[in-house]
Image (cartoon, grey):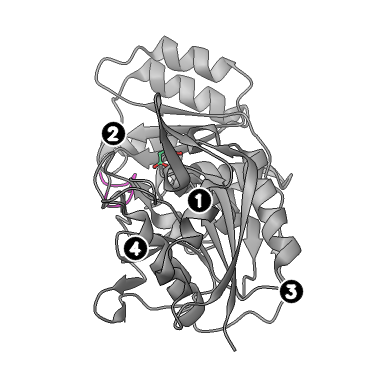
Amino acid sequence: MKKRIYIAYTGGTIGMKPSQSGFVPVPGYLTETIANMPDFYHDDMPEFEINEYMPLIDSANVSPQIWHTIALDIQSRYDDFDGFIVLHGTDTMSYTASALSFIFEHLSKPIIITGSQIPLSQLRTDARINLLNALYIAAHHPINEVCLFFNNYLFRGNRTTKQYADGFDAFVSPNYAPLLEAGIEIKKLSKLPVAVPTEELVVRSIEVQSIAILHLFPGLNWQVLDNLLKSPLKALVLLTYGVGNAQQDKQLLDTLKRASERGILIVNCSQCLKGAVNMQGYATGHALNEAGVISGGDMTTEAVIAKLYYLLSQSLPHQELIEFFQSDLRGELG
Ligand code: ASP
């Protein structure tokens, strides 16, 4: 029996059509293009059904509401399909992959998010190889988690980040090895989850929350931070230097301390792509710890944002919120 895969097409370059003003998403165009590509109907390919969302969006317009819509859509078809593919623009693909990983608990089927840098209808497209492999892997090498497939690698979705604006290797997973490599063989590169959960699928809520990111730089005026923290924030992500260091500016540190005492969660994430935060390494990091800042460990910024949205949507007591944030919930934290 052939496996059945559901494809949710949300928008993005993969299905766009050339127009006088550049590439634009056009309803029906992706489905029609695939229907004319015999490779998708090869004997070794699974059966698939495509649902084009209305309207198709550029992923720059993605929001937590859209993550919720995708999750409910997959949940409503969960029993009817063996796996799920989400076609999505690359710009915010890692945010969506991270968010879906927190929304779905006890997944027993694969969800693979993919897209492309060049539309499927174009000569030098990377969409054909991305979508063919995503379908093939969902059917023949299923991994029960939210994954991202791009340029011959299957990644854990919440470990990825977009690294290359216009290259085919658009995504990396800086702190976690890819799960599979689609070479001559489909090769396992990481320890994969073996147990299929026995619990029922749970779909968690995720809502917009008032959070912000501040990228530190030499000479940052503490009053800018102070003003930001006066807005009705629930959490602030500080993008710090190296292993989690910040300038030892007393006014800046006092501002952070006052905010964390008011209950604003302040998270320390590194500006570096690779490695983890360690606030015990240098006095400049230790000072942040003393000011009540908590560590983002080796999580990507995308995973941190999605995790904050997710946890803040669960109405947890403050201490539990901190504990959950610093625990590994879906393989996002080393
Ligand atoms: N701007 C597009 C999007 O993210 C880029 C892409 O699809 O790759 O929707």
Q: Amino acid at mark 1?
A: Leu
Looking at the image, the residue that sits furthest to the bottom is 1
Residue 143: give x, y in percent of width and height. 49, 75
Residue beneath label 3, please?
200
| Label 2 to label 4: alpha-carbon separation | 46 Å
Residue beneath label 2, please?
284
In the foreground, 49 or 289: 49
Q: Is residue 67 above or below residue 114?
A: above
| Label 4 to label 3: alpha-carbon separation | 33 Å
Residue 314: give x, y in percent of width and height. 72, 48
Residue beneath label 1, please?
30
Q: Residues within 10 Å of mark 1 (few under 14, many from 20)?
A: many
Q: Amino acid at mark 3?
A: Glu
Residue beneath label 4, please?
129
Which residue range is magenta in the image?
274-281
Q: Does residue 330 appear anywhere in the picture?
A: yes
Q: Secondary structure at mark 3?
A: loop
